[in-house]
Amino acid sequence: MTVTRFAPSPTGWLHIGNLRTALFNYLIARKTGGSFILRLDDTDQARSEEEYVDGIKADLDWLGLHWDRIERQSDRLDRYATAADSLRAAGRFYECFETPTELDLKRKKQLNMGRPPVYDRAALALDEAAREKLRAEGRQGYWRFELALERIEWEDGILGPLSIDAASVSDPVLIRADGQVLYTFASSVDDMDMGITHVVRGADHVTNTATQIQIIRAMGGTPPAFAHHSLLTGPQGEALSKRLGTLALRDLRAQGVAREALLSLLARLGSSQPVALRADLDEIAEGFDLSQFGAAPTKFDATDLWPLTRAHVQSLPLQAVANKLAEIGVPDTLAPAFWDVARENIDRLDDLAGWWALCRDGAAPEIAPEDADFVAQALALLPPPPYGPQTWAEWTAQVKAATGRKGKGLFMPLRKALTGRGDGPDMAALMPLLRRVRALEDAGG
């Protein structure tokens, strides 16, 4: 069975970049009838917060990315300790004592000599007496994994054949001096234990993948199939990381972006396939193909979400918006007619409230000075509501006959007087919904 996972850290709100990773892994599992695991990377207890855990769940639930089971790395600390012991016994784990300042000086020296800033493995030369001496001096040991100095190769699901020379990479720190298990180690243990078969994540994890392949193999496991999607940039190619705080999923949801718009855009963005609005996750999964994605940075423009949101909202049947209509106070008897009138004039569902307010309370009239006399004459011919489907045609015909105006010079001033705006629904359909006409009331009608 295909088993994928999404492993966010609950140290902040999910953003558009997180969604891309979550969606890809979800779609792979959905398409193959596999399993999708939500795994919370919460080993950093100082920064992890339950508020963000709840937020992650809420965002995924809203999107329909339902997990088959949830795991928390903070519940697996004993397992990581056991795995660390096994690597120590195998001679692949070693204790180091350099301070951050000492490591920085080493890196600078290597760079000055034209060498890659790779850890020099000085700690491997320490015997137990030397380590005890360092501990007595107050130094705390941290643990690195000793990479086998070979070329690490794999077939990447997006980038194709990849290989990294382990000699060009520092032995990764897997456990900090304070005992915190780091991502590279915890993720390797989890992927092996949970039978993860496919991992899709950002291209910034390629080096992590190389070291994790060795770690999993050193523990006797089989590495999953890895794929690395391109990183998102802003619409001008600028780094998106500086703007991710404004692209939190909870904020996009609050702005009225439709989940269908997010899913449809992110499932195709950066691929050779055109973006097309899809309302059903099964349909999105059916057309999903990792091989269609490229390695180049992918431009993301949040404004692209609005045409998709508009198209989705305007396609909804009455029953899908019935609760929203009831929430804003539209009577059941008027709901079908109101939805037919309003749907073509909204970008998001929240826009319905404004149109119902216009129908219920009337709108402040917009009357140009040069049209004031004309509008006054027209309003004298308009009875108070309620109106029928023929009211607009009959009224404008009367006004035309009385004033001689026609075309835009006739219709636009009347529309603005009744609705306070120059755009909107067909007036013949809108007028039967008007409960009040403030221009008529102002005129004493």
Image (cartoon, helix red, strand yellow):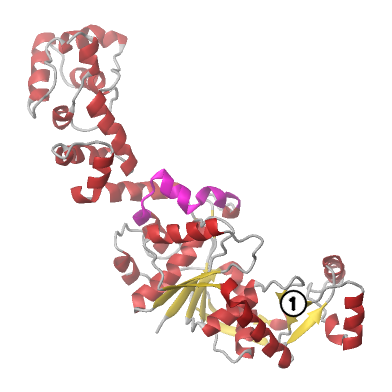
Q: Is residue 315 magenta?
A: no
Q: Is residue 368 above or below residue 42?
A: above
Give the labeled residue for mark 1: 170
Q: Residue at x 33, y 69 (%)?
A: 287
Expressed as whole percent of the image width and height from the top left, the position of residue 83 reads 64, 85
- Nearest the viewer among 290 and 66 is 66
Residue 415 visible in the shown view: yes
Residue 161 as seen in the image, left or right of residue 416:
right
Determine which quarter of the picture holds residue 297: bottom right
Q: Which secondary structure class fits the magenta region best?
A: helix
The residue sitting at the top extreme is 373
Q: Residue at x 47, y 48 (%)?
A: 251
Q: Is residue 49 above or below residue 375?
A: below
Q: Residue at x 87, y 86 (%)?
A: 125
Magenta stretch bounds: 242-261
Q: Is residue 249 magenta?
A: yes
Q: For the C terminus, which image quadrant?
A: top left
Expressed as whole percent of the image width and height from the top left, the position of residue 366 reads 30, 17
Residue 302 visible in the shown view: no
Q: Residue at x 22, y 46 (%)?
A: 322
Q: Secondary structure at mark 1?
A: loop
Residue 43 as seen in the image, left or right of residue 156:
right
- Nearest the viewer among 329 and 305 is 329
Q: Is residue 76 above or below residue 230?
A: below
Q: For the N terminus, which image quadrant?
A: bottom left
Expressed as whole percent of the image width and height from the top left, the position of residue 94 reads 77, 84
Expressed as whole percent of the image width and height from the top left, the position of residue 70 reads 47, 71
Residue 103 as seen in the image, left or right of residue 83:
right
Check disc 1 and give the amino acid type: Ser
Residue 317 as seen in the image, left or right of residue 189:
left
